[in-house]
């Protein structure tokens, strides 16, 4: 008695070879027949038609290899367990697919697998029937090419789904694709047939589940019984389905094109191969539309960027002219008439030049900060800072503005108040908010710097008692996105840009800029961690 399963199989093979009746039945068939080991689908035996179809030199070239090596490609997510599950459930498994011969020639064919048992050992029978040489220009392929090359866009989807309904004598055809950030369902973006209310197909326990794994799938009947909870099937009453996956540029399934019939569907010759080509052409059209849409968006973005650049250059030019004219004017006066001025007059004029140059520096620094924000190059280093020292640091930048408009500066910040903040960001924040407030404070008004301790944090406040700021502009600067801020129809100004940068710098420190504004008072405030 033989103890091992392998030895049993070898004994059966020898017995089959010695059985003239078995060999006659095996070789009389014009179709390629393989006997497979049920455990791993290794080829145990085959007939002469199989040797001829797969261009083998002899039977020994095919025996002892797995049947899946006959395929032109291995199905996605393949498992022997999955195949056995299908065989146990339905008695047999059929599929059209591409095969590769021993001489590396490719053809399209139909395979049928079925479990059998004889001589006390269970086997799987595999039958392969050649349908056509791969991608030959048959009549159906010519029709596909004619249909898919004469229209584009929505008209293409209309023509292709109509053709599928006519070809399969079916009621419905549809195209569906994945949804961004939602792996659980597909969205039907084109449907041919009667209007339906359901626009999504769930992937779990659905008739499209295998298709989305990369298989061309066919369910000839009893679809509603197989998938009783599917909403599409409930609404359409479909009883049969054939569908092909649509692949993205990385080779992963991104959607499907499918046909639904309200009665049993008869599979036509080369139907899965045909549907695969249609699916490929459909995927290409979807990619083309997406690329066109991306190009349109990019063109629009480029136009907006150019508009932003032109507007920004205009603003920079206007804002540079005033301080530069002041510096040039005074430098010319000093060069030509320096002997005519007293020490006090020279000091005054040099002070004006100094203020103008500082304003120029602030302008350029804000532009540099904006560039760094856009590129994400700013890094935050939180450490202890004296708030009064920060105010002393910006005094030279606000002195000229306050004196020019006779604005009183009221500093109520305690001298020993320490906060946790990034030194550079905090200085820019305070300077830019103060500049905006001063620019919008009426002559002879006052600007106040103050603090208030709330919930263990310092609330820093910069306010004006008599302002001309536009509430709509202030709200826009504090709520708009970076892109919206620049492509807006509003006229840009450097103080507004400075205020926007202050807002973004506060975000980097995990806090925000707030405002209170009425007819008389303008008040900006933000929190800083107590050191």
Image (spheres, helix red, strand yellow):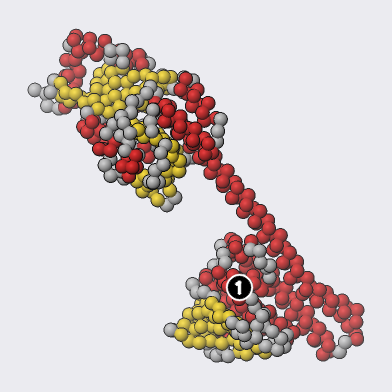
Q: Identify the residue at image location x=37%, y=40%.
A: 212
Quarter of the picture containing the N terminus is top left
**In front: 209, or 171?**
171
Residue 204 visible in the picture: yes
Would you identify the image quadrant in which residue 276 lies? top left
Question: Residue beneath label 1, please?
Answer: 472
Q: Identify the residue at image location x=45%, y=32%.
A: 162
Residue 80 visible in the picture: no
Question: As drawn, which residue projects farthest toward the left?
Answer: 1
Would you identify the image quadrant in which residue 408 lies? bottom right
Q: Position of residue 144 (x, y in %)?
A: 49, 27
Q: Position of residue 65 (x, y in %)?
A: 30, 25
Would you identify the image quadrant in which residue 170 lies? top left
Q: Position of residue 384 (x, y in %)?
A: 51, 80
Count of numbered circles in the view: 1
Q: Is residue 247 left or right of residue 237?
A: right
Q: Is residue 33 left or right of residue 524?
A: left
**In front: 190, or 13?**
190
Q: Position of residue 521 (x, y in %)?
A: 60, 84
Q: Is residue 338 above or below residue 184?
A: below
Q: Residues within 10 Å of mark 1 (few under 14, many from 20)?
A: few
Q: Identify the residue at image location x=71%, y=86%.
A: 443
Q: Is residue 234 above or below residue 463?
A: above
Q: Is residue 310 left or right of residue 64?
A: right
Q: Identify the residue at image location x=59%, y=46%.
A: 295
Q: Is residue 122 above or below residue 30?
A: below
Question: As drawn, which residue projects farthest toward the front?
Answer: 194
SS class, disc 1? helix
Q: Is residue 107 above or below residue 398?
A: above
């Amino acid at each position: 008695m033989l103890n091992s399963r392998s030895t049993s199989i070898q004994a059966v093979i020898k017995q089959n070879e010695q059985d003239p009746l078995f060999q006659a039945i095996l070789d009389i068939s014009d179709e390629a027949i393989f006997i497979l080991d049920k455990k791993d689908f290794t080829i145990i035996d085959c007939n002469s038609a199989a040797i001829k179809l797969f261009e083998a030199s002899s039977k020994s070239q095919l025996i002892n290899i797995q049947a899946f090596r006959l395929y032109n490609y291995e199905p996605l997510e393949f498992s022997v367990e999955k195949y056995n599950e299908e065989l146990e459930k339905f008695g047999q498994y059929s599929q059209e697919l591409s095969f590769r011969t021993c001489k590396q020639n490719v053809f399209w064919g139909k395979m049928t697998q079925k479990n059998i048992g004889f001589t006390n050992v269970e086997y799987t029978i595999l039958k392969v029937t050649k349908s056509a040489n791969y991608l030959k220009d048959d009549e159906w392929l010519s029709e596909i090419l004619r249909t898919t090359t004469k229209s584009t866009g929505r008209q293409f989807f209309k023509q292709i789904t109509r053709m599928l309904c006519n070809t399969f004598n079916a009621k419905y055809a549809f195209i569906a694709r994945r949804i961004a950030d939602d792996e659980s369902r597909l969205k039907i973006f084109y449907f041919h047939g009667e209007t339906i209310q359901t626009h999504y197909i769930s992937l779990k326990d659905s008739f499209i589940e295998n298709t989305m794994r990369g298989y061309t799938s066919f369910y000839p009947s009893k679809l509603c019984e197989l998938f009783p909870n599917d909403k599409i099937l409930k609404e359409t009453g479909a009883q049969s389905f054939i569908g092909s996956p649509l692949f993205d540029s990385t080779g992963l399934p991104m959607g499907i094109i499918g046909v639904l019939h309200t009665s049993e569907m008869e599979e036509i010759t080369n139907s899965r191969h045909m549907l695969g080509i249609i699916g490929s052409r459909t995927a290409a059209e979807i990619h083309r539309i997406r690329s066109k849409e991306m190009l349109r968006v990019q063109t629009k973005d480029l136009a907006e960027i150019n508009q932003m650049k032109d507007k920004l250059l205009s603003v920079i030019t206007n804002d540079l002219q005033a301080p530069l004219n002041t510096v040039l004017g005074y430098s010319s006066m000093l060069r030509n008439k320096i002997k005519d001025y007293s020490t006090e007059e020279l000091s005054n004029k040099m002070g004006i030049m100094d203020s103008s140059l500082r304003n120029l520096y602030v302008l350029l620094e804000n532009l540099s900060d904006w560039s760094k924000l856009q590129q994400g190059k700013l890094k935050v280093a939180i450490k202890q800072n004296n708030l009064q020292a920060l105010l002393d640091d910006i005094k030279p930048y606000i002195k000229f503005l306050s004196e020019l408009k006779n604005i009183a500066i009221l500093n109520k910040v305690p001298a020993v108040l320490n906060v946790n903040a990034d030194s550079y960001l905090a200085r820019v924040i305070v300077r830019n908010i103060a500049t905006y407030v001063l620019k919008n404070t009426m002559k002879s008004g006052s600007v106040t710097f103050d603090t208030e301790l709330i919930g263990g944090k310092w609330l820093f406040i910069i306010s004006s008692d008599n302002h001309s700021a536009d509430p709509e502009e202030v709200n826009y600067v504090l709520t708009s996105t970076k892109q919206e801020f620049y492509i807006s129809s509003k006229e840009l100004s450097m103080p507004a840009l400075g205020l926007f940068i202050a807002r973004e710098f506060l975000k980097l420190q995990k806090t925000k800029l707030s405002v209170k504004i009425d007819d008389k008072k303008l008040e900006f405030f933000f929190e800083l961690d107590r050191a």
